[in-house]
Amino acid sequence: MKLVLFCDYGLDDAAATYDALSHANADGYEEVHLVAVAGNVPAAVSLVNAKKLVAHCDFARPTVYIVDTTDEKQPAEYLKDIHGNDGMGDLFPIKEPRNARVVKFSDWLARFSGEYDFLSLGPMTLVPALLKKARPRRFIFMGGNIAEIPNFRGYEFNHALNRSAFSECAKFVHVAVTMDTCRHPLFNIQQKEIAGEDIPHRIVRRSRELTFRSGEVGCYVWDDVAVKALRHPEWFETEVRTDQDGNELIVAKYIYGKEYLEILED
């Protein structure tokens, strides 16, 4: 069984990836594929950040593939106020990962096969290519909004960067972790003190710090909520909702009742 993550490596992607990787062996995955896409940062920066993050994961994990998408045309921003100058909070020095293979997206896609679970945590530009090649066992994406005030050009950020790809992906069986899912009061850590010097706490603390610079109202570790939805589906209910583009989304609704920092400790 494989786990595939498409991440546009900002801080919340880093938190999500660390969470998924640290539990991958226990969750039964034999391989983890990290596809470094453009979005929060350009694809080249996303690739560097994926390598840095994996290099600093000092725990046993399955075989890791890092997928380079720099040859693929993708829309991107460079949200330094939100994600730091290097796109990942300026937390990690450059370091090459050991025991991780880097492969070009076109080669990876051509050879990809087998059963897999799929987390899409960035813009959907390259997602349809994988969904058309092989259907996942579970497909969870972070993106979209129903009732929450949009955060980018009238849409949720991942949706805004490629609306047509988002709509195409929404036609596949999925669970959507939308802005509505993530902006739960229990997930807001902006007024919380965050102790701990391990990597998850450092990432979350830096996310909080940068919200005061960027002027964001609230601090939510968006993409890590999608990992929670994959790993703990019992923490969520789902309901079918229609967004402003007419996409029918199966939206996750958090029901577990613990605050984000509590489930981070878990």
Image (cartoon, grey):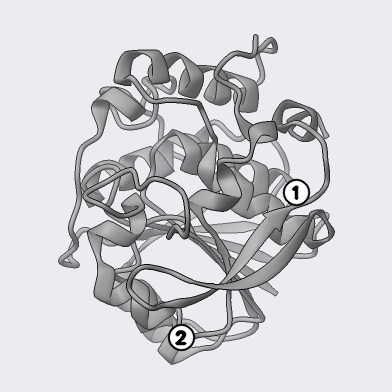
SS under mark 1: helix
Dot 1 crowding, Cα within 10 Å, few <14, some 14–19, many 20+: some
Mark on residue 254?
none
Q: Which mark lies nearer to you, 1 or 2? A: 2
Mark on residue 171?
2
- Find the distance from the CA under tag 1 to the CA under tag 2: 29 Å
Identified at 25% across, 34% down, the residue is 79
- On screen, residue 264 above or below 208: below
Q: Quadrant of the N terminus?
A: bottom right
Compared across the picture, whether 13 is left or right of 151 comes to right
Asked if residue 91 can be seen in this view, the reply is yes
The residue nearer to you, when weighing 78 against 113, is 78
Q: Amino acid at mark 2?
A: Lys
Dot 2 crowding, Cα within 10 Å, few <14, some 14–19, many 20+: few
Compared across the picture, whether 97 is left or right of 17 comes to left
Q: Picture coordinates of residue 83 (x, y %)?
A: 35, 29
Q: Which residue is mark 1?
A: 23
Q: Quadrant of residue 199?
A: top right
Q: Earlier in the sequence, mark 1 or mark 2?
A: 1
The residue nearer to you, when weighing 87 against 47, is 87
The residue nearer to you, when weighing 75 against 18, is 75
Q: Picture coordinates of residue 63 (x, y %)?
A: 62, 59
Q: Picture coordinates of residue 259 (x, y %)?
A: 75, 31
Identified at 54% across, 51% down, the residue is 180
